Image (spheres, grey):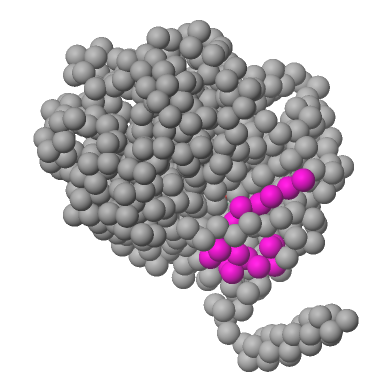
Amino acid sequence: MIRSDNGYFGEFGGRFVPEILLPALTQLEDMFFALRDDPDFWQEYVTLCQEFSGRPTPLTPLRRLSKQLGGAQIWLKREDLNHSGAHKVNNVLGQGLLVQRMGKQRVIAETGAGQHGLASAIMAARLGLDCTIYMGAEDIERQYSNVFWMRQLGSKVQPVSTGAQTLKEALDEALRDWAASVETTHYVLGTACGPAPFPEMVSWFQGVISKEIREQAMRQIGRLPDEIVACVGGGSNAMGAFGDFLDDPEVALVGVEAGGISFEDGQHSVRLSHDTGETGIAQGYKTLFLQNDDGQLGDTHSIAAGLDYVGVSPILAYLSQQGRIIPESATDDEVTEAFSLLMKTEGIIPALESSHGLAGGFKRAREMSPDQHVVINLSGRGDKDIFNIARAFPQKEWTEFLQREAARSTELLAQKRGH
Amino acid sequence: MFPAQHENLQIMSHAVVGFPSLEENEKAIAGLAEAGVRLIELQVPFSDPVADGHTLVNACYEALKHGGSVRATLDLAQKVCARHPEVTFVLMSYLNPLYRYGLEELFEKAAAVGIKGMIIPDWPVEEIEPWLPKLDALGLAPILMVTPNTAPERVEKIAHASRGMIYVVSRLGVTGHETQWGEKFRKYIAEIRKHTDLPLAVGFGVRTADDLNALTGKAEVAAFCSQYIEWQRDEGSEVAAEKMKKVISEIDTATT
Ligand SMILES: Cc1ncc(COP(=O)(O)O)c(C=O)c1O
């Protein structure tokens, strides 16, 4: 897995935070640097992932769909089968081990799609920690089922209603909380962004994905795949899927960003592929941000809350600049189409974030030959997107059900108040 | 200019450029100068001000809607520096707007229009150090922050890179909430003084005349910002200036 040069990857990365957060970040970095060179720690982590989250996740061949598309053989790395339903739990379990070593009793997290928040709430429940999750008010509306479960698990979900009310604002608010609570609280950052050591550390924990892909490909395909494709929000599942292959030039690495509605400002979250992102320094790190001429971070859009983010992993920004990864994008419409296609052809319900990887991967596979192999990282399952999918494919029965359920729930609440 | 060590406590107040509007900024600054304020921060509004509490966050958002920007800040600075030579103006900004403008050009322009110092909360000392020769040549003082959890070696490093004064963050957290000024705070200040002869500007949680009196004899400067912006927001710049005048009149005079 890639290592930084003092927190930097080329010109990107670094640690640009208010002074107050510095001691916690250096403590975390010292601990992480010591543990990553300790093989027993990796073993402890992998065992935890196996016992608690069902790792290794399978590599599933899509025989019917590959044949239908007529190109390369497509395989899915099934991160959707993790406990909690997404790759996010890998990083959270890893950071949980660090929290235990630090002896902190409280954790905070930011979340977009709610998968990282859910994974953090699960870890907090399991370890008996106090947990607050910051989530944009807009994202709460988009991913309510995850909000529901976080609260049931005993976490506090704090809506953030500044700015565009999405992931960027949730991250700002988590940093503000941390500035006040840093002595007792660990910030479980959910993606390969933010100040050092987070990009490097989150990528290292997620690297379990690519280590498994390598082994499984050798066993199931008999060689390394020609391409690995992953969606890119902050970049943690992509870094996880790519990490072990950076020194295998024969394996193309493709990151698919959220093309949204169009390339107009505010209608997409494409930072790498179309010269839309500009180098900037915010939220604790230097990377390609969507921003205006005055250096104000821009508004973003994606159908997938987890990709609706203004910055990108400094590691991916660097690898993209170096030409080691190929940045692509998929529009909201291409994504719902890919979602449907996978579901109907292979019986797998993907998350909308992951469906960006599918859309990008299917498009590329079509252009390849049947003796080639593409692995797409299916970062999460689609259960959380039930409301979004219902909106994309309206059904009378669903609307009628919601009305009945709303009436039942209103009645229950009234009864409870009556007592 | 910046106060000398052990001079009487004075107030540093604040303008968020574009809040409530660019025209109003000029009047508000005139009001502060008239009230006796001799140090004023001109804050470049930013979309993601992570060291600020809700008052300044919301002021930033409002300011961005009303034309606040790096350029607007330099324009405003040019006017107010010329108009109020008795006041020392300090640029306060998060790094990205300045970085995007071009740091070198920004520093040169800021110095040329009369800005004397800069407070940039997300610009760590390691990144500032290479710029010191340039900043010294321009006479533009980097005012770095020390926080209660900063280790002594690091206080030393920060003191070494600071010019003009050191910004002492009074407590953990962001701007805009209360602070306690007890024995722990006194020890904290004493520890910092071991590493520097620069005057200390204390900020975060200075909201009342009582806070100011608690700081009298401990610090040279008290950053009176969020409370002032709240007055300005709720009652307008004129009333805010009157209130500031009253607060200043209530400071006991004693030397540190
Ligand atoms: C299922 C899923 N995939 C992908 C992402 C995007 O994040 P990252 O780019 O860090 O993998 C998210 C984020 O919430 C997610 O929930």
On screen, A117 above or below B14? below
| Magenta stretch, residue numbers | A130-147
Determine whether, in the image, residue B71 is placed left or right of residue A286: left
Depicted A315 relative to depicted B56: above or below: above
Residue A209 rendering spot, x and y as whole percentages = 68, 40
B72 vs A81: above or below: above
Which residue is more in the foreground, A304 or B228? B228
Task: Tell me residue B170's x, y (percent).
Answer: 53, 30
Report x, y in % for residue B116. 23, 26
In the image, A132: left or right of B112?
A: right
Residue occupying the point 60% across, 17% down = B187
Q: Nearer the viewer, residue B102 or B185?
A: B185
Q: Is residue B37 above or below residue A387?
A: above
User: Which residue: 22% across, 32% down?
Assistant: B87
Determine the residue positioned at 36% across, 37% down.
B248
Does the stretch in magenta take in B77?
A: no
The quadrant the C terminus of chain A occupies is bottom right
Residue A150 in which image quadrant:
bottom right
* Position of residue B33 in the picture relative to residue A362 (left or right): left
Q: Position of residue B104 (x, y in %)?
A: 22, 26
Q: Is residue A143 magenta?
A: yes
**Res B186 seen here:** yes
Q: Residue at x 63, y 62 (%)?
A: A351
